[in-house]
Image: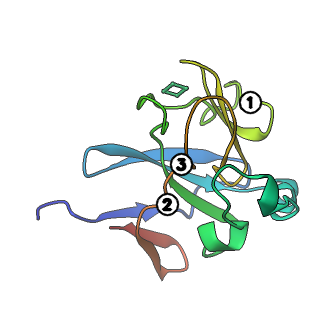
Amino acid sequence: MALSTTDVDISAIKPGQSVTVVWRGKPVFVRHRLPEEIADAAKVNTADLREPETDTQRAKKPEWLVLIGVCTHLGCVPLGQKPADPKGEFGGWFCPCHGSHYDTSGRIRKGPAPSNLPVPPYQFTTDTTVRIG
Ligand code: FES
């Protein structure tokens, strides 16, 4: 089980920034969310969602979102990690393959992807370290 966990130093990730790390060969998105992104994610009526999950089910700490960055349609890596990337109609991530839009909680909102970007197992091992896996 070499590299079954990945430790991420989050101390330098400023609000509004995201980093991509690799865990078990997959990209994992770690986003330091802005207050408005958290508010947008929280106010969604889960009855409107293809895969109903509240934001608090998906984020252990509201300001940090940890997602497996693999589109649930055909497995592309969605755009939205870099400041200049398109983030889709719901402000999170956009997969240009066939146009899947994810919100600021990584939930599928529009397009062909069947489910939300998965949340990997993770924990905060210190205030500035996230252990994925
Ligand atoms: S792989 Fe993302 S929309 Fe097709």
Residue at horizontal 82%, vertical 64%? 42
Of residues 8 and 107, which is closer to you in this image?
Answer: 107
Instruction: Give the residue displayed 71% in from the left and 25% down from the top.
Output: 86
Q: Mark 1 or mark 3: which comes first in sequence?
A: 1
Quadrant, the N terminus: bottom left
Residue placed at 80% from the left, 31% from the top?
89
Of 65 and 9, which appears nearest the observer? Answer: 65
Q: Which residue is mark 2?
A: 119
SS at mark 2?
loop
Task: Say whether disc 2 or disc 1 marks the residue closer to the N-terminus.
Answer: 1
Camera-nearest residue between 119 and 53: 53
**Which quarter of the figure is the C terminus placed in?**
bottom left
Q: What residue is disc 1 on?
A: 88
Tell whether label 3 touches label 2 (CB within 8 Å): yes
Name the side, left or right, on which 116 lies relative to 87: left
Q: Residue 71 in the image: x percent, y percent?
A: 49, 36
Amino acid type of the residue tagged 2 in the rendering = Val
103 vs 105: above or below: above
Residue 41 appearing in the image: no
Q: CB at mark 2 closer than 8 A to ligand 1?
A: no
Do we see residue 124 in this rendering?
yes
**Point 19% across, 60% down: residue:** 3
Q: Is mark 1 within 8 Å of ligand 1?
A: no
Q: Is residue 81 left or right of residue 8?
A: right
- Distance in Å between CA atoms under marks 1 and 3: 14 Å
Amino acid at circle 1: Gly
Q: Which residue is mark 3?
A: 117
- Residue at the extreme bottom: 126
Secondary element under disc 1, as helix, strand or loop, is: loop
Q: Residues within 10 Å of mark 3 (few under 14, many from 20)?
A: many
Spatial CA span between label 2 and label 1: 19 Å
Q: Amino acid at mark 3?
A: Leu
